Amino acid sequence: MYLLRHGRVAYFVDGRPVPPDDVHLTDEGRSETATTAAALSGITFDRVITSGLPRAVETAQIVAPDSAPEAWPELRELEGGSLASLPDPEAAFTGAFSGTLQEDARFLGGETIGSLLDRALPALQRLAGEPGWDVALVVAHGGTIRALLSYALTGERVFLGNFELAPASISILDVGDDWIVRAVNVTPYDLAQTRTRLRTMEELWAQYKNM
């Protein structure tokens, strides 16, 4: 199972946040995703599954253009709340994926980690149990993929936040009687991780405060 985070996007445009359901890949995101697609070009995917959000569907179309992606909304990203109402926006952004998060922790004042686990883990287990496929591509989001990797590593309902998952990065699971994590955050366009030393949420905080 190849877990692919969608390509780079712009969550803030012209000084305003973009509604999450309307976020699309940027030109840089499409370029980076094309490099990731080249790295995966020798692989035949039996299933291509996305969250159904535009940025995930666009990424799947670049990486697996000959496959019709399935939409599994339960794999969508954590839903943030009203950014303007956050009492400490910087802490909310930079601490969003720090440490082992409790289930009542809210992502940017919105959806809880427990809610994400409630929908994403059964989806992962359902896919793993369905017959008729050997290699699957799952195009999802940073929070969602963290939840899936956390389960694969521990076998438990837990959310480990300290994974960095760059846009268009690949994480790989072997699915069977046991779960084997073969790779995390492979970025074919930046294998040495030299582009930035900021975490994704730190980058988003910088964009938000400069709106």
Image (cartoon, rainbow, N blue to C red):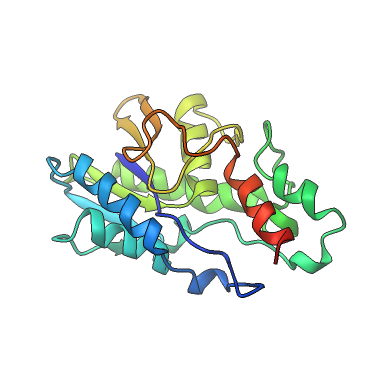
Q: Is residue 69 left or right of residue 111?
A: left
- Image quadrant assignment for residue 26: bottom left
Q: Residue furthest right?
A: 87
Q: Residue at x 72, y 39 (%)?
A: 102
Q: Residue at x 74, y 46 (%)?
A: 105
Q: Is residue 79 left or right of residue 48?
A: right
Let me know if residue 71 appears in the view: no
Q: Is residue 76 left or right of residue 102?
A: left
Residue 22, compared with residue 116, is above or below; it is below
> What is the x, y in percent for residue 28?
39, 57
- Image quadrant assignment for residue 11: bottom right
> What is the x, y in percent for residue 67?
17, 60
Viewer-nearest residue: 90 or 152? 90
Q: How many marks?
A: 0
Let me know if residue 14 appears in the view: yes
Picture quarter with the C terminus: bottom right
Picture quarter with the N terminus: top left
Q: Is residue 137 left or right of residue 197?
A: left
Viewer-nearest residue: 20 or 45? 20
> What is the x, y in percent for residue 189?
33, 41
Viewer-nearest residue: 64 or 31? 31
Q: Residue at x 18, y 39 (%)?
A: 134
> What is the x, y in percent for residue 97?
65, 41
Residue 47, compared with residue 192, is above or below; it is below
